């Protein structure tokens, strides 16, 4: 199945809005229905021709859509899965963009009306809302795609439709992945770095007299770290990820132990940090995109 | 006093090497003596004409230099202050690049032969060594400059010489700052983000089976965070910073409390994270440099 003829996107924030803009550019024939609780966002999306029609969630003609993408904040997204499925045509495809997948796919498995394929585009910025949306947000991005749940038949067709959507939106790589495996890995790839960054910002906000000076002294590292803390959408996904609390406690314990080591045996600590720096360099991550 | 006629740089790594390259470009008439324990680095620096003469630390003719810059790793830098000062001409200027300033300036105050002006250029990358040095590393950077210590007279002349050096190297802003105030602020601007990133990398290295997948899923955030962990030079400065252990323990406690909150009251936690994201956005940090 090629990309659907009529697509619904619920939530026109950074991710949903960028998806609409990217698909508008790549597939001008596609009819896109934009759905949001914020009528201002709907107006802007219409004005930029990111969407062809707009609706608020209660009145959206979801039965007309072959594919619906849930792109709200994580908690709202989770709660909307079953009500949305109930309003769609049986056998249609429902998908999402949430950064946690176990809780989402488990909820979607609680119905058999539509085919649900959980997805997670690994892309984001510290800014939010349709105003921050860009047709290039997903250019080259990796998109995780989970096995279909819900309706029993035509699962592969649904997976193909969702993958087709993301390839059209610019994805550089599609990764078939089990929801639990996804959440375990994303804990380290995204959620822990985010929570650590948020707590650094919180620490700084508690020493208000130092904050202006710390900002003045901010080298690239501080900008990089605290930029993550501005990406509030990750917080919602982290809250749905059952791996996160344990991993955050482990990270806290490592930091506490490191603080003790720095006091008691700074040389040994420096050796350990040096080895970690080597580990990081061996990771040979892809280069940063231009910002 | 304009930039000195003859300059010694001890340590031709990322920072010292970049300083030599930047000054070579901006002040071609300046004679630069490069000093390093690594003869390979000295050869490369000579081959690239970053320096005019090379020497190992034991044999370097430091008495010929009007200004000497200490640019070794933090622990070695601290230990070299008094021996270096003892070999310089009385009244000459000694300065450094270390990311912690209290311990450094206190040590330098223990002699009165040379004028010591502690400085800290806020710039770096995850790479190290002369091979990673760039004449543009300090372009637009903020450089913290501490009050002179050591020899009693002509302190202002020494401060002017050091500032002149950094302006020539491309600094965008010079910040006069007390060492203790510097270390308190840099704890949040640099050392805590670095330690948190290093511990995220350590956490990830403990779940070896997840690591490749986490890297595959790595969005910009992960690259940004773990990039810090690769900047091993920050670790040495963090180890000299007396504010760091307490701040790291506080950060650990915040993370542990956040983990508990995520388990017990996720909605409340999300509100808190959302407020922090707003705080971060209000910081209005300068844009990231091109990478």
Image (spheres, coloured by chain):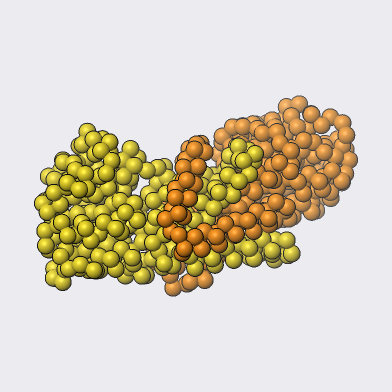
Chain colours: A yellow, B orange
Say which quarter of the image contains residue A249: bottom right
For the question of whether residue B161 can be seen, the reply is yes
Please provide percent x and percent y for residue A33.
17, 45
For the question of whether residue A141 can be seen, the reply is no
Of B280 and A264, the residue lying toward us:
B280
Q: Residue at x 82, y 38 (%)?
A: B149
Tell whether A186 sits left or right of B191.
left
Please provide percent x and percent y for residue B25.
60, 34
Where B65 sits versus B221, above or below? above
Tell whether B48 sits left or right of B105.
left
Say which quarter of the image contains residue B3: top right
Please provide percent x and percent y for residue B267.
42, 55
Tell whether B113 sits left or right of A94.
right
Q: Residue at x 41, y 67 (%)?
A: A242
Where A247 sits versus A130, above or below? below
Say which quarter of the image contains residue B39: bottom right
Callout count: 0
Where B199 sits versus A13, above or below? below
């Amino acid at each position: 199945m090629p990309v659907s003829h009529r697509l619904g996107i619920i939530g026109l924030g950074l991710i949903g809005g960028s998806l609409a803009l990217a698909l508008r550019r790549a597939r001008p024939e596609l009819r896109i229905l934009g759905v949001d609780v914020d009528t201002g966002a709907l107006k802007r999306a219409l004005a930029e021709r990111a969407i062809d029609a707009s609706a608020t969630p209660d009145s959206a003609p979801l039965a007309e859509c072959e594919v619906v993408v849930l792109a709200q904040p994580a908690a709202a997204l989770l709660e909307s899965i079953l009500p949305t499925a109930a309003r769609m045509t049986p056998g249609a495809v429902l998908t999402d963009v949430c950064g946690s997948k176990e809780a989402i796919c488990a909820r979607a498995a609680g119905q058999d009306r539509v085919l649900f394929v959980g997805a997670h585009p690994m892309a984001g910025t510290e800014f939010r809302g349709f105003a921050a949306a860009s047709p290039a947000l997903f250019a080259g991005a990796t998109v995780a795609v989970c096995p279909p749940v819900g309706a029993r038949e035509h699962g592969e067709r649904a997976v193909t439709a969702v993958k087709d959507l993301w390839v059209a939106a610019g994805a550089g790589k599609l990764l078939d992945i089990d929801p639990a495996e996804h959440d375990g890995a994303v804990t380290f790839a995204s959620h822990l770095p985010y929570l650590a960054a948020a707590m650094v910002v919180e620490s700084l906000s508690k020493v208000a007299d130092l904050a202006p000076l710390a900002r003045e002294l901010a080298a690239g590292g501080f900008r990089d770290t605290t930029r993550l803390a501005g990406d509030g959408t990750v917080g919602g996904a982290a809250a749905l990820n059952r791996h996160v609390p344990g991993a955050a406690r482990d990270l806290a314990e490592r930091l506490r132990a490191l603080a003790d080591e720095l006091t008691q045996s700074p040389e040994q600590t420096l050796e350990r940090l040096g080895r970690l720096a080597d580990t990081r360099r061996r990771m040979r991550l892809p280069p940063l995109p231009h910002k």
